[in-house]
Image (spheres, rainbow, N blue to C red):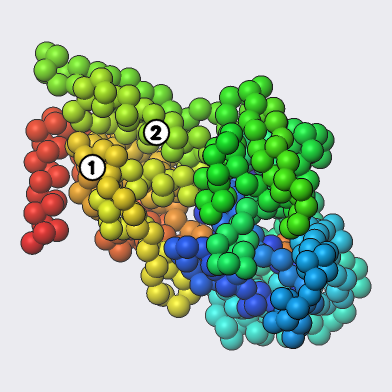
Amino acid sequence: MNLCSLTSPNPCNTTISTTIKNGGSPKSFTNNHPQNPLNWPKNPSFGAAITGAALSFTLLLSPPLSIAADSPLLDQTSSLSDDAYCREDEREFGAEMEFSAPKLKTNEGIVEEAWEIVNESFLDTGRSRWSPESWLRKKEDILRTSIKTRSKAHNVVQKMLASLGDPYTRFLSPEEFSKMARYDMTGIGLNLREIPASNGSVKLKVLGLVLDGPAQTAGIRQGDEILSVDGEDVRGKSAFEVSSKLQGPSETFVTVEVKHGNCGPVQSVKVQRQMVARPPVFYRLEKIDNGATSVGYVRLKEFNALARKDIVTAMKRLQDLGASCFVLDLRDNFGGLVQAGIEIAKLFLNEGDTVIYTAGRDLSQNAFVAESPPLVTAPVMVLVNHNTASASEIVASALHDNCKAVLVGEKTYGKGLIQSVFELHDGSGVVVTIGKYVTPRHLDINGNGIEPDFSDIPRWSDVTKSLSTCNRLIEG
């Protein structure tokens, strides 16, 4: 994707909430994710997640937009024939997919559109030079002169964003934006997104297909609804969860039941996987105290689409082998899929425990919370170092702040910003810092990192004592 260097954790370990829009201003979007981490942009559903060697961001995709969305006819849908409704639905969905042919806009309009996105959404994390007054003056200065070419407009946007002093707020060329929008994390060459159904539930539809990829070759089409994976009904499940189910070893097959369009036929399609995510978990059982204690050691290298499933397998297997305590090794784990980090943290937390907070420009905080009892209740030691970043820091802080684990090693990297990616009318885009993550104890991760409890490996009796003290303080 070449959006940032994969050799350094600094530019790449950011959580990015991506909103793709066609037409209208950014303020016309709201977040309808079930946990609603942030109130912007409007109407995205959790569509997919993107990762790289050190890349960590979440893709949020907007529902279909068309003239009909703002039309009085919207309230008269029931009076239309089924055929007319289906044709309209197909037209609307197809219109959103045409990233290569957005509505035309003047060069000055492109610059002003980028300016407006920053004006409405940008979060000053304390290291930039942004203020509403200075930002307004910048627009006035820029638009005093004509911008004669589209490349000049892009150059102006680049410089305008650079003036903020935020290394993560940046411009995306149309080519970069298109690659991001169609990124495949399923292993079969498609990208999923959630859209609301008329009955209040959620449908999963194919947002984009890799040209000549396994899914397209097998007959899956853009706009198809995913109904089941290997015979399991996936209606109502999140795009992240279904993408993980589609993942598997390279060259194996997965059977996907799809409904072509809104009113088309249902077809069962057998697709051969291609390897996208590598198995990220290594685990073993170790004996200590002359064999009296069994310790389950789990090394998690990155948070990809296989991470949660592999962690569950490892923890259950180690428990069956008699593990009475666990070591979770997150050293040199730069992050990955933030949603995978949140879901893995929940495996260790009590129902109702907070995983992480998100904070936006209005300074309000919204929580991600565990919804079920923990998979693991035994004491946990989390190994961290200065390269433990992003999703790894979410897991480490969640377990630590809820008294489920002690942290051992070095201070973590300190990467907890959220970016949102907005499409401009010419198919380019801007990445804008819009929020940050805050630990359950309301500590700002970004730029600060997380201090460990121990610098060297402690005795398990000290781990148990530390966790007991932590719980007493919370209860008291």
Q: Position of residue 458 (x, y in %)?
A: 16, 32
- Could you tell whether 125 is left or right of 466 in the image? right
The reply to whether residue 385 is visible in this rendering is yes
CA neighbours of label 1 inside 10 A, class few (<14), some (14 to 19), many (20+): many
The residue that label 1 is drawn on is 405
Which residue: 65% across, 26% down?
253
State whether residue 456 is above or below residue 42: above
The residue lying furthest to the right in this view is 148
Q: Nearer the viewer, mark 2 or mark 1?
A: 2
Type of residue at label 1? Ala
Which residue: 20% across, 49% down?
403
Quadrant showing the N terminus:
top right
Q: Secondary structure at mark 1?
A: strand
Measured Cα–Cα span from mark 2 to mark 1: 16 Å
State whether residue 306 is above or below residue 420: above
Give 312 or 224, whichever is nearer the viewer.
224
- Could you tell whether 66 is left or right of 236 in the image? right
Circle count: 2
Image quadrant where residue 405 sits: top left
The residue that label 2 is drawn on is 311
Type of residue at label 2? Ile
Which residue: 55% across, 44% down?
233
